[in-house]
Image (tube, rainbow, N blue to C red):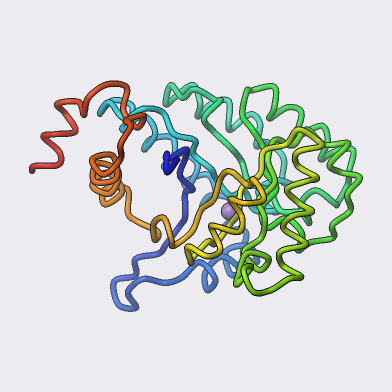
């Protein structure tokens, strides 16, 4: 349908001398030094602040996906921090999704299970990021309160001419359907990839084909243009609200 269902918060470092530093460079250092904890908290607060701002501008609610690092998750205190920030920014928790990798889930199962339930009790949803690339123990899909699988982009790449990728993606979609989980394909770059995934009824996707990573400000311009190019309007509660019009013009 081309409807926009959500956004994923991605962190970048605008360095005064070195320009835009990629997360591949600074996240491992942040994890090693422990700085990932304040950084992760900043990302979460910033994402909530942005959701709040968009709601005030009149944008219909979008799912906000937030990546949680293993260090941040295992350290404890995440459910409590989440509860505080949800309240502080007046966020509807149904629109918040935390993304965890398989490796996060595989260590200390009982503690993990408890934390996941505490997060779910807040009304927040959970996704497994880069699904199929970690330990891939399928038993956790039964045990853990997961809402969504994210098909790793390595299975999406050239899927239209890579039978093994097509088989793996199809299996993940089938698994999601039979376990009543949502599924989304990551890293779609070509319309041929999208077509194959659509055909196997993978109904959501993300990637460069739809939009490159954007600053929050550029995203507003993008979504206004996107809405204008659509036949049906479900991006805004009504017509484009006045505040957003003003924003777009000035
Ligand atoms: Mn992610």
Residue 6 horizontal side relative to residue 28, left or right:
left
Expressed as whole percent of the image width and height from the top left, the position of residue 187 reads 54, 62
The residue under the point 85% across, 38% down is 111
Expressed as whole percent of the image width and height from the top left, the position of residue 79 reads 66, 31
Residue 146 horizontal side relative to residue 232, left or right:
right
134 in relation to 82, above or below: below
The residue under the point 63% across, 47% down is 202
127 in relation to 31, above or below: above
Expressed as whole percent of the image width and height from the top left, the position of residue 220 reads 27, 44
Q: Quadrant of residue 166?
A: bottom right
Q: Nearer the viewer, residue 194 or 36?
A: 194
Q: Looking at the image, which residue sits at the far bottom? A: 18
Q: How many marks?
A: 0
Residue 74 horizontal side relative to residue 92, left or right:
right
Q: Quadrant of residue 133?
A: bottom right
Q: Nearer the viewer, residue 176 or 139?
A: 176
- The quadrant of the image that shows the C terminus is top left
Q: Looking at the image, which residue sits at the far left? A: 250
The residue under the point 56% across, 65% down is 27
The residue under the point 74% across, 37% down is 146
Q: Quadrant of residue 16?
A: bottom left
- The quadrant of the image that shows the N terminus is top left
């Amino acid at each position: 349908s081309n409807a926009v269902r959500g956004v994923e918060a991605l962190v970048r470092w605008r360095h005064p001398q070195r320009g835009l530093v990629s997360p591949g460079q600074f996240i491992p250092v942040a994890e090693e030094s422990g700085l990932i904890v304040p950084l992760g908290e900043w990302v979460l607060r910033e994402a909530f602040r942005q959701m709040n701002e968009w709601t005030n501008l009149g944008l219909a609610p979008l799912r906000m996906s937030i990546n949680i690092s293993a260090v941040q998750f295992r350290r404890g205190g995440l459910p409590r921090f989440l509860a505080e920030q949800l309240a502080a920014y007046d966020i509807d928790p149904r629109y918040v999704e935390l993304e965890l990798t398989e490796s996060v889930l595989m260590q200390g199962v009982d503690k993990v299970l408890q934390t996941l339930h505490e997060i779910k009790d807040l009304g927040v949803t959970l996704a497994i990021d880069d699904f199929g690339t970690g330990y891939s123990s399928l038993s956790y899909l039964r045990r853990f309160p997961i809402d969504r699988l994210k098909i790793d982009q390595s299975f999406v790449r050239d899927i239209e001419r890579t039978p093994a990728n097509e088989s793996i993606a199809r299996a993940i979609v089938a698994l999601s359907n039979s376990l009543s989980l949502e599924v989304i394909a990551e890293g779609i770059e070509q319309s041929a990839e999208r077509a194959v995934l659509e055909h196997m009824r993978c109904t959501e996707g993300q990637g460069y084909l739809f939009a490159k990573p954007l600053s929050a400000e550029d995203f507003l311009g993008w979504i206004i243009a996107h809405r204008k190019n659509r036949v049906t309007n479900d991006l805004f509660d009504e017509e484009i609200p006045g505040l957003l019009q003003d924003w777009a013009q000035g």
